[in-house]
Amino acid sequence: MTEEIGSAEKKSDADLDHALSSALRTAPLHPETLARVRAAVENEWRAAAAVERPSSRSRRWLWTSLAATIAVGALALGWFARPGGTAASFGSISRLNSGDIDVRFAMVRHHSLQAGSPVRVGDILTAEGPALISLVGGGTLRITAATVVDVMGANEIRLERGMIYVDKPLAASGNLRVLTRAGTVEHVGTAFEILSNDQQVRVRVREGRIRLRSTSGDVMADAGTELLATPDGKVAQHSINTYGGDWIWVAALAPEYEIEGHPLLDFLQWVSRELGRPVKFADEHARDVAEHTILHGTVRGRAPLDALANVLTTTTLVYEMRGETIWVQSSP
Amino acid sequence: MGAGEQRAFDEFFRDSAPRLVAFAIRRSGLDAASVEDIVQNTLIKAVRNLASYRGEASLFTWLTQICRHELADTARKAARRPGHDSLDEPEVVLRVSQQLRAPSHLEPAAEVDAEQHRGAVIRALNALPERYALALEAKYGDGLSVDEIAGLLGLTPIAAQSLLARAREAFRERWVESRGETRNGVAPT
């Protein structure tokens, strides 16, 4: 009886394998066709790569900036230099996706920071690649390549240029103040991104609420709002999505989440927060599984979406993106 | 690759293009010329937007997302075109007559059976969650090992093995349903 069933199952498995193999094998494109595709794609790639390389225009801009810096040298020196004894801890480098972080202190000493290095008050950080900094008191600061951040105090930084993302959950202590050309950004329990260039400062609020204190007064902004502010005090507001392509760089720098011994629901909430997308359950069974499943193993080194896919394959749940929502359901 | 390294582009094209061709053929059943356009557009959009790819999903998964948009665009454009050709046009008469002619190396009945079988498998596959379908395509269509599938989908080998097992079971259910309906004379939807 057992053998007969086993034999029938084997035959059924073989039928299934044959059905899939015979239907899914495809003939490759003709080599000439593939060569045509390659030529077109390669041309496009060369054009795109040329745009990304530093242009002579940006080099001219660098020289202009340098000249301007020298012209206002006395003012800048007074602004940059701080007492040499300041060494309070600000945080530590959790991850560097590429390159080091160059650190200046008091305009004189230079050294490099690697993953694990402490960041101290008084450091002026220039990131060669994307970096994640864990903050003393909780929360993280994520910075993109070529961003310059001046650590003014344990809870105060100045964004010289580039883009940062501040994530200070409500449970974290201390409110980080970010000084920019267009004013100071303050918050209470929130996540937001700031981009600063010569012309303007852009603040995008992903969670909670921030206050921008500029020369023309205070502006409050809630989650899903973008502020565009100029150094002369003009501020414009727009609505934005808190998920999607604009936030991919933030997810790529997400802190590691240790799943070992944690409920699946906690992990889903972490994914939700990192991707800026709400998680919804399609059925009660799916919610029940998420609440009662304890995870084991690790998803170290995986971006949130890959970690989600990885973890759910070991459960009876599957997920699907529907609009902004991560829709979790029992597997079919 | 974003920095313009030739070797990186060579690897990108060598690893991605053939799999993307297979993906587009399986998901659409389009002819070679249409698939060429779709794959070319997909890869061009990918290299233009490389800066936006930050590893939130595996590279191949990202490419298939772009490819699915291309396939959907093609389907939309096809739907907007007239449903039938005018036989007043000499070029159309020539093309339609060529399409009506069966290839000499095929037995028509066997070809119809094979197409019906393939259609049933593809429909069952399309009804699965995307990652299940990608895993089965990689195993049975591209002949990849579990380790290679793990690399392709950004999974650990254990997770890839688990995904394949689930995908296979889910496919079995859909396929059995589909075959049952076919035997009873009802075309699977």
Image (cartoon, coloured by chain):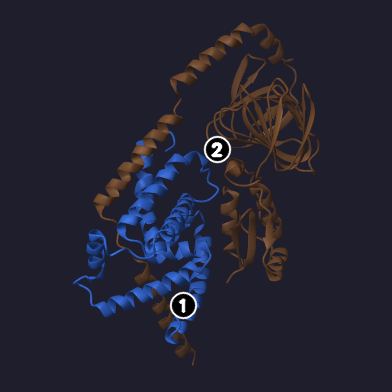
Q: Does the image show residue B65?
A: yes
Is A169 situated above or below B146?
above
Residue occupying the point 64% across, 57% down: A326
Nearest the viewer among B19 and B180 is: B180
Question: Which image quarter holds the C terminus of chain A?
Answer: bottom right
**Relative to the observer, which residue lies in front, A234 or B12?**
A234
- Residue B17 sits above or below residue B145 on the image: above
Label drawn at residue A2 = none
Which residue was labeled with disc 1? Answer: B188
- The secondary element bearing badge 1 is classed as loop
Q: Could you say which chain is coloured blue in the image?
A: B
Closest to the camera, between mark 2 and mark 1, is 1
Looking at the rendered structure, the kind of residue marked 2 is Asn
Q: Chain of mark 1?
A: B
Q: Is residue A227 above or below residue A285?
A: above
Left or right of A28 in this view: A238: right
Q: Residue furthest bottom?
A: A1
Label ID, residue A97: 2
